[in-house]
Amino acid sequence: MNHKVLQLRELLNRKESEKKPHSAISSGCQPLDRLLPQRGFQQGSLVEWIAGGVGSGASLLALLAARSACYGGGALVLVDRGQSFYPPAANACQLDLQNTIVVHPANGRDECWAIEQALRCPDVAAVVAWPARLTSQAFRRLQLAAEHGSSLGLLIRSATARNESSWASVRMLVSPRSCPLECGDLSPLSISNSVATTKLLASPSQPTDKAMTSHRTPNRKGWRLGVELLRCGGLFGTKPIELEIDHQTGEVRDAYPLPLAAQLAGTAPDPRQATA
Amino acid sequence: MPLSEATALGNQYDGPPRPSNQHNDGLRGPSYKRTPLHIESHDPFEDHKALEEIAVWCHRFSPLVGLADEDPVETLLLDVTGIAPLFGGEQAMNQQIESAFLQQNLMVRIGLGDTVGAAWALAHYASATLRGRESFSAEVVTACGDVGPKKTPDPFAAEPRCAAQLLELPIEALRLPSAIVETLSRLGLQRVGDLMPLPRNELKARFGAILLQRLDQALGEQPEIIARTHSPTNFFVEWLFEHPVTQQSVIQQVIRQLIERLCFLLLKQDTGSLQLSYRLTCQDSKPVTFEVGCYRPSADASHLWKLTETQLERLMLRDPVTSISLCSIRHDRLSRRQKELFDDDHIRQDSSLVAALIDRMSSRLGRQAIVRCVLQSDAQPEKAYRYEPLVGGSVSRRKNNSHSPFSLLDRPLHLLAKPVALEIYDVAADGSPSRFQYGGKQYAVSRYWGPERIETGWWRQRGVQRDYYRVETSEGFRFWMFRSLRDGCWFLQGAFE
């Protein structure tokens, strides 16, 4: 294509992008969207998920956000230095593995480089990474790369990163909550109605493995995760919310949903503003 | 076959002893020594690459050599129309092909037919007496006569012969999908000849167009084209220095020129390179070689130079360089798309920018570091998936959109590469863990789901017998652990991060 045409296209694209602000990307769960001022994450920004500990569910929420970001098209890049990412679980999250690129960098330097390169690519919708250490300069580079490529960077950090400086536009602390005592059926001994299933996973021509599952019916309470918005733009330290992930459906909902009347009251326009 | 099964089988069966060339005194006869078992995991990409190399080598028998359209590819197609007299007849030609393969330590089955379909069928399913008009052994090569519909008789071609043989072969010989073969066998149609009396319209309505297409292709009623495998030596450029060179800048400049020359050759044939091989011959030491791979075929000199530049940065040259050669060892047709002034959002997936990103990252981090996930039907969690390199591994792009049998919280997002032994302090009466220690911290279990028994077959050397539990601690953290049924020890397999 003619060089002048390319220049024209770039110029027009720049002008257009100046006019329309970056649209918000849903976090993948409605209660979390309601917590965020823009009802989602800003395109071309970094989101930092601080995990409250091992097995806290921060990666799960980040992956749901990545899935949501990929709905509009674009690839998903997973930078997994520890090589511990488990694809069958991601498939259970309904993540499109065909559209997912997994990167296994050997060291921290390559990890930062890979995240930056992926964020800079305009056709990458989201980048998920678990960087152990990030210097302020490296963090800044990642932020600029995300802005340049309009990609969403989802960084899952350990609890020690909470006191470090951050260039992420949104910072969240994810820590699980213990199941409330009033559940009643928490004790494993009280679980009943055991169901046993057997499945064969190989074709007759191949050696077969068998997995016999003996599930006890879990209680109806899902996994509860507390999410605290540490920072979001100029917003600091909001009231934490509690999410509940349903065991059967995988639906993420508010653990303490407001009564219908209160919800309607919250969504209804303020009559004083209306009359003003 | 999984690696563990191959190892188990290999340990059970050492294989026949091989004669040793070193000790043969004529009296005691040849002494034998057992070669140690060597097992390597199967790499489909390397397999395909090796077959392509063999296809190129087969150009000595035929000017038109290609690979069959099957998955996995295991058949070579040679168009030998009018060639047999050059070898002294068809029998002599087949014998020469067979002996040439045997010299390369390759076992082959040769089928000689009037069409690609017939030759494929004869090579795979005919008995030794039917294969070709003469008897031939082995497995990989299919040599065929006329390709396409029957036309003017060729003075060198033999009389039509394979149709009758073909009708006696099993239905599988028609290269049909397994579902159709299964249905046909349920209906009692076992051989190709059983299809002939049936009405064609009904066959098409019941089994789709593929059945008649394959049948017609085998019988020569429909044409079938052999996709030519090109010789990689077509795309080769070299620079010989008048005097040995040590300056990095000069070497870089020469390589840039070589890339431009190679791209010119590639573009002339509307081809892009998938893998480039560099060879820098040094004055006093061994040649330095390195390779550069691409996700998509590329003949863009600046893109190929960028990929090469990252490799050159890490290259250590100790001796002066006397010559530099550049060869495209894998290439394919360039994919072209109509350019638009404003690209739409829906084109973003699998875009050229993503391809360029993959190339850049592969060039710096290595081919094995940029991968795609492929799920596998295996109960053992560690073997339920595998990674395929994106660059170079694009031979078989299988769809991987299988529906997950698990729900969101059935499996953890992080799996430990090797299960970590756990110290269990307390076990409930039903065998579930109540208190355990991990990472120097004690956890009390408040809820659990399980046991989920996972055990692999006895034929696996390192099979597993485990009872898995998903546990939630009193603080709400979730882990995936198991008790080995062999020794009763507890291990942590993953965490619900």
Image: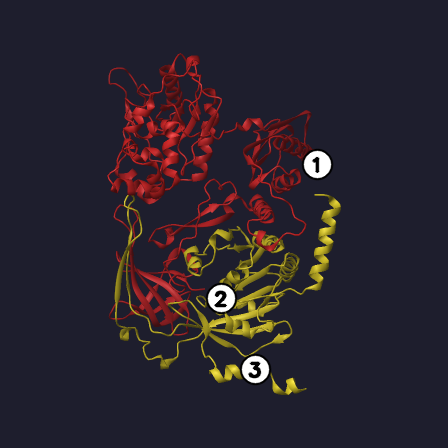
Q: Residues within 10 Å of mark 3 (few under 14, many from 20)?
A: few
Residue nearest the observer in this picture, B284 or B340: B340
**Residue A112 placement (x, y as % from top left):** 59, 55
- What shade has chain A been given? yellow
Q: Is the residue A253 above or below the residue B221 in the image?
A: below
Q: Residues within 10 Å of mark 2 (few under 14, many from 20)?
A: many
User: Is B307 left or right of A249, judged from the image as shown?
Assistant: right
**Label 1, label 2: how many angstroms apart (C-alpha)?**
49 Å
Q: Along the polypeptide, which appears first: circle 3 or circle 2?
A: 2
- Mark linked to residue B249: 1
The letter of the red chain is: B
**Label 1, label 3: how many angstroms apart (C-alpha)?**
70 Å
- Mark linked to residue A268: 3
**Residue B365 placement (x, y as % from top left):** 55, 46
Secondary element under disc 1, as helix, strand or loop, is helix
**Quadrant in which the C terminus of chain B appears:** bottom left
Quickly name the residue at label 2.
Answer: A61
Q: Nearer the viewer, mark 3 or mark 2?
A: 3
- Kind of residue at badge 3: Ala
Residue nearest the observer in this picture, B303 or B143: B143
**Residue A210 placement (x, y as % from top left):** 28, 53
Q: Is the residue A155 above or below the residue B38 in the image?
A: below
Taking the spot 29% from the left edge, 43% from the top edge, the residue there is: B183
